[in-house]
Image: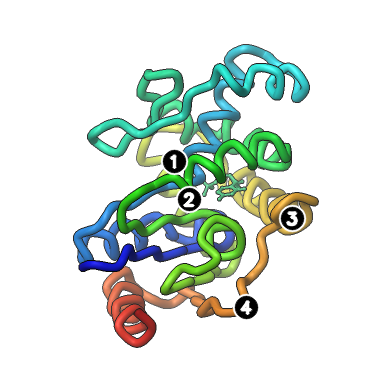
Amino acid sequence: MSERVQIAIDGHSSTGKSTLAKALAKYLNILYLDSGAMYRAVALYQMEHNLSDQDLINRLEQLEVSFNAKNEICLNGKMVENEIRKMEVSNRVSGVAQIPEVRKKLVELQQKVPQSVVMDGRDIGTVVFPKAQLKLFMTASPEIRAERRYNELRSKGEEVSLKEVLENIKTRDFQDENRTTDPLRVAEDAVYFDNSDLSLDEQLHKAIQLYHERA
Ligand code: DC
């Protein structure tokens, strides 16, 4: 593969973007990068240090967000993959993702990735990689997404109710779509991908087909 491949998978929260992105990256033998994990890591930092938004902005320069060799998210060198998935972080992350200074820092880091990559997030096709060879916009009904996320959290032993998860999903949809800086929107050249009724195999098959058509 001589040309650098960039594949952008955006969409609503808990639509299975990362599952599809990982499977596609594996199939193409390229890197997968979870941009949401980066926003979650910043939210975790704010939470752990009990910082106001302004304090967080003031400390951004000292904050290092990276991925280790196992592709796990690290905050100032410490692996925080498990901490960032907790409900408390999910409830806070949309607020952090609205801060323009945070977005600027993370977008710059994402754009510096030197190799071929499948990246999932909210603004990958619109802001981070506007020239991506393939852009998918994933969605599914809030109820289906809540059920998937609920099962995932429960399997990790987290005590949550389905109602709480559904509310969190709806709130995040609203905040992601309505923030001033880089809101979630469908890129003009993105393929709309509703996976409410598709298995992972079917999604992967469709994504591979689209990639070959476009790349
Ligand atoms: O994909 P996720 O649920 O892990 O993302 C966590 C939050 O980060 C989500 O509420 C929106 C935000 N986000 C963003 O604003 N831009 C991205 N590229 C990725 C995530």
Callout 3 amino acid: Phe
**Label 2 crowd bin: few (<14), some (14–19), many (20+), radius 10 Å:** many
Residue with the mark numbered 1: 153
Pointers 2 and 4 in contact (C-beta within 8 Å): no
User: Taking 140 as reference, is 179 above or below it?
Assistant: above
Residue with the mark numbered 3: 174
At mark 1, the secondary structure is helix
Residue with the mark numbered 4: 188
The one of 103 and 49 positioned closer to us in this rendering: 103
Callout 2 amino acid: Arg
Residue with the mark numbered 2: 149
Residue at 70% in and 24% down: 57
The one of 108 and 69 positioned closer to us in this rendering: 108
Q: Earlier in the sequence, mark 1 or mark 3?
A: 1
Cα distance in 3D space between marks 3 and 4:
21 Å
Residue at 30% in and 31% down: 68
Q: Earlier in the sequence, mark 2 or mark 4?
A: 2
Of tags 2 and 3, the one toward the viewer is 3
Q: Is mark 4 within 8 Å of ligand 1?
A: no
At mark 2, the secondary structure is helix
